[in-house]
């Protein structure tokens, strides 16, 4: 009976440690979400991308300057987030959080994870700049050719009340249901 109580106590302690670790991780991620949504962070990141986006090209071979920009970005953004977390969480350790992040990366939302990966994953960092450049220069994917609007009532699909462009490469809605 004493052995059974000992097992229960050990299990309760393990669950307590796990729950505290989960709460600490969730709290840290919540603070990171708050930090990256704040205007000050958004401005800092936008200014950084604005300063360097013109160097990036969508080619397989990377320019030497990319690594210098990457190192500066990691230093600036990581230090900012770390400083903010230390203000909000007494005793915060980036090293401890990074280890926890490796084990729990599947518990973080896509946008936050993508931003955190941009600190360690050079390809994610480069893609962030290419996306910014495409948006800035208006060279992103143009999906307008997938939508055709016509004013003709001759080709009307009565079952859906939609216009079908006879020149569209796509087939219209199926009449058989």
Image: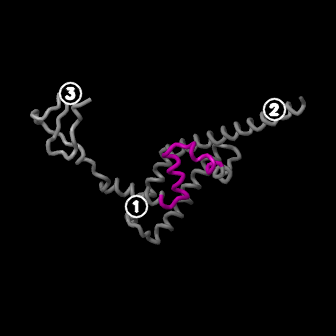
Marks 1 and 3 sit apart, C-alpha to C-alpha, by: 49 Å
In which quadrant will I find the C terminus?
A: top left
Marks 1 and 2 sit apart, C-alpha to C-alpha, by: 57 Å
- Image depth: mark 1 or mark 3 in front: 3
Q: Residues within 10 Å of mark 2 (few under 14, many from 20)?
A: few
Q: Residues within 10 Å of mark 3 (few under 14, many from 20)?
A: few
User: Most extreme residue toward the right, as rendered?
Assistant: 2
User: Most extreme residue toward the front, as rendered?
Assistant: 176
Label whose residue precedes the other's in the sequence (1 or 2): 2
Question: Which residue is label 2 attached to?
Answer: 8
Question: Which residue is label 1 attached to?
Answer: 53
Question: Which residue is label 3 attached to?
Answer: 159
Kindly state the secondary structure of the residue where label 2 is placed: helix
**Quarter occupied by residue 10:** top right
**Nearer to us in this view, 72 or 103:** 103
Look at 67% across and 54% down and name the residue there: 95
Label whose residue precedes the other's in the sequence (1 or 3): 1
Q: In this view, does 122 lie above or below 26?
A: below
Kindly state the secondary structure of the residue where label 3 is placed: loop
Marks 3 and 2 sit apart, C-alpha to C-alpha, by: 64 Å
- Image depth: mark 3 or mark 2 in front: 3
Kindly state the secondary structure of the residue where label 1 is placed: helix
Q: How crowded is mark 1: few (under 14 residues within 10 Å), some or many (20 or more)?
A: some
Membership of 130 in magenta stretch: no
Taking 141 as reference, is 125 left or right? right
Boundaries of the magenta span: 100-123
Q: In this view, does 73 lie above or below 153?
A: below
Label whose residue precedes the other's in the sequence (3 or 2): 2
Membership of 102 in magenta stretch: yes
């Amino acid at each position: 009976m004493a052995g059974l109580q000992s097992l229960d106590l050990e299990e309760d302690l393990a669950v307590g440690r796990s729950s505290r670790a989960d709460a600490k991780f969730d709290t840290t991620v919540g603070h990171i979400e708050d930090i990256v949504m704040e205007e000050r962070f958004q401005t800092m990141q936008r200014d950084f991308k604005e300063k360097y986006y013109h160097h990036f090209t969508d080619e397989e071979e990377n320019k030497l300057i990319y690594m210098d920009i990457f190192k500066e970005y990691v230093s600036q953004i990581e230090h900012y987030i770390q400083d903010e977390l230390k203000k909000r969480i007494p005793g915060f350790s980036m090293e401890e959080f990074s280890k926890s992040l490796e084990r729990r990366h599947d518990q973080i939302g896509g946008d936050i994870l993508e931003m955190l990966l941009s600190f360690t994953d050079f390809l994610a960092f480069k893609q962030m700049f290419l996306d910014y450049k495409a948006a800035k220069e208006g060279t992103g994917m143009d999906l307008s050719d997938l939508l055709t609007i016509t004013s003709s009532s001759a080709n009307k699909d009565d079952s859906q009340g939609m216009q079908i462009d006879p020149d569209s490469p796509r087939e219209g809605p199926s009449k058989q249901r």
